[in-house]
Amino acid sequence: MKALGVDFIHRVMATSAVLAGLSLLFVSVYYNWHFGLGIFIGTAWGIANLHFLTQLIGAVVEPGPLHKRKVVLLALVKFPVLYGAAYLVLHFGDLSMLSFLIGFNIIFAVALLKVLGRLLNERLEQVQPPDNLNRVVR
């Protein structure tokens, strides 16, 4: 299997955002508006968390001199601001913790399904069709 790069993470975030939007619509209509909003906010928070984590790791391991200001700025945004926002939303908001956690875990489900799809696709490419597949049976 080929290495999974930053483009894979961006595709996971984009797919998760689409799935969160669809979940907001369907869960809001068929179950409860607050529960759907919790799923959406949990996914949005997870996408922001993954985005800042990707940027932080990229800033630390990129070749060349270390940009300390960028690393410190990303760390300050990711840890206190992002986690503080999650605390405020969950503590003072009218959202279910379960819906927030479901939304947060959508990203992991999307990443797992994308990796499994990639593995399955590689397996199917390795399988050779039988030679007599095109022969007409009389």
Image (cartoon, rainbow, N blue to C red):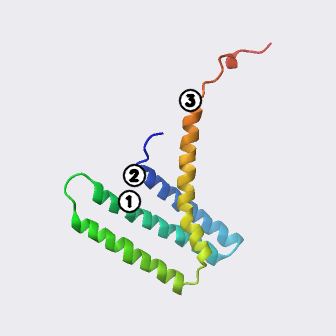
Looking at the picture, how far across and down is residue 17, in whole percent?
52, 62
Residue under pointer 2 = 6
Q: Amino acid at mark 3?
A: Gln
Nearest to the observer: residue 75 or residue 35: 75
Distance of mark 1 from mark 2, alpha carbons? 8 Å
The answer to whether the residues at label 1 and label 2 have Cβ atoms under 8 Å apart is yes
Which residue lies most toward the bottom here?
Answer: 92
Q: Secondary structure at mark 3?
A: helix
Q: Nearer the viewer, mark 2 or mark 3?
A: 3
Looking at the image, is 87 positioned above or below residue 7? below
Identified at 57% across, 60% down, the residue is 19
Identified at 23% across, 68% down, the residue is 69
Looking at the picture, how far across and down is residue 85, in whole percent?
44, 79
Residue under pointer 1 = 54
Looking at the picture, how far across and down is residue 132, in whole percent?
69, 16
Distance of mark 2 from mark 3, alpha carbons? 26 Å
Q: Residues within 10 Å of mark 2 (few under 14, many from 20)?
A: few
Left or right placement of residue 48 versus residue 134 in this view: left
Identified at 38% across, 65% down, the residue is 52
Left or right placement of residue 130 versus residue 86 in this view: right
Q: Secondary structure at mark 1?
A: helix
Q: Residues within 10 Å of mark 3 (few under 14, many from 20)?
A: few
Find residue 126 and name its label. Answer: 3
Q: Is residue 37 visible?
A: no
Choose the circle earlier in sequence order: 1 or 2.
Answer: 2
